[in-house]
Amino acid sequence: MAQSIYSKVSAARNVSVIQPRAGAGLKAEHVSIILEEQPEIAFFEVHAENYMGAGGVPHRQLEAIRQDYPISLHGVGLSIGAERPLDKEHLQRFKILNERYEPGLFSEHLAWSTHDTTYFNDLLPVPYDEPTLERVCSHIDQVQEVMGRRMLLENPSTYVAFEQSTLSELEFLSAVVDRTGCGLLLDVNNVYVSCVNHQQSAEDYLDAFPMHAVGELHLGGHACDEDDEGRPLLIDAHDREVDEAVWRLYEKVIASHGELPTLIEWDNDVPDWPILLAEAEAANRILARVHSLKEAVGSVRAEGGQGGEARLAG
């Protein structure tokens, strides 16, 4: 299907390379201090829809940031899972942004937010069945063809399950990757939120996740509530620090699969810049700790191998 389409897409674009370290979502109120202090941070992520005008202050700020840092471009409005066709004008604006800023990574959500001529300010879930799979894959094909590059698809945070679903979320995501050649953005907080809400094991989910396709990780905070029956209900709020349970899952992912670019999301009740930077630095400490441990294990194995060779030679 789209694998043949994607194979026609140029893989040689001049884009910024994002290192496997931590970045943060770029907020307008932080731009001045970032430009002044030049913090050591791997990249900044921007929501594409905030920059779809032709100019003005948002673009002047982003151009200044782009001079010093790589960026990732994160869409929230393409409505990949919608029954209606993609908005070609919106997609074209996305393409212009991609060409203007040459982001190192480009991603969107497995969700829908449009119906007929109505646009919703939410990322709404999709059923996991064959008709939805075909539609999502067709939309991703179209996006990758227009953008001329690979897209990362983000796993959702969910609060309901559809009776009509015939596939698990993991089966659905794996099939999308196989059919379209897209990558995945693994949001670890979304995994934790969804698994708590559906009374499933986040560890088992992550063990089965198609990590070979993952190009970026997301971390964020969630709010704790209860449903009508008194069971825990978590909300993907992006309004606080990363929860300790999510940090533990993140470290497990990194230890098992290696370092990846990691984004700290904080979109509501945005704190002062030092607080957001501290979250990115916490992620970097985990990345560094896992990297050092793997190097130490590799050194021990190498020394053991050399000792074995010496014994054999003797």
Image: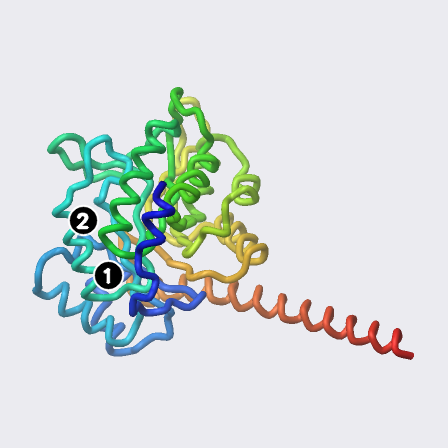
Q: Which mark is residue 235?
A: none
Q: Quadrant of residue 116?
A: top left
Protein image colouring: rainbow
User: What is the three-letter code of the residue carrying label 1?
Assistant: Lys
User: Which residue lies under the disc numbered 2?
Assistant: 91
Q: Is residue 64 left or right of residue 187?
A: left
Residue 144 on image: x %, y %: 28, 50
User: Which residue lies under the disc numbered 1?
Assistant: 27
Q: Given contact means CB atoms under 8 Å apart, are the residues at marks 2 and 1 in contact?
A: no
Mark 2 vs mark 1: which is more N-terminal?
1
Residue 12 on image: x %, y %: 33, 66
Q: Is residue 193 above or below residue 37?
A: above
* Residue 96 in view here: yes
Q: Closer to the observer: label 2 or label 1?
A: 2
Q: Residue at x 8, y 64 (%)?
A: 55
Q: Is residue 258 left or right of residue 101?
A: right
Residue 115 on image: x %, y %: 17, 31
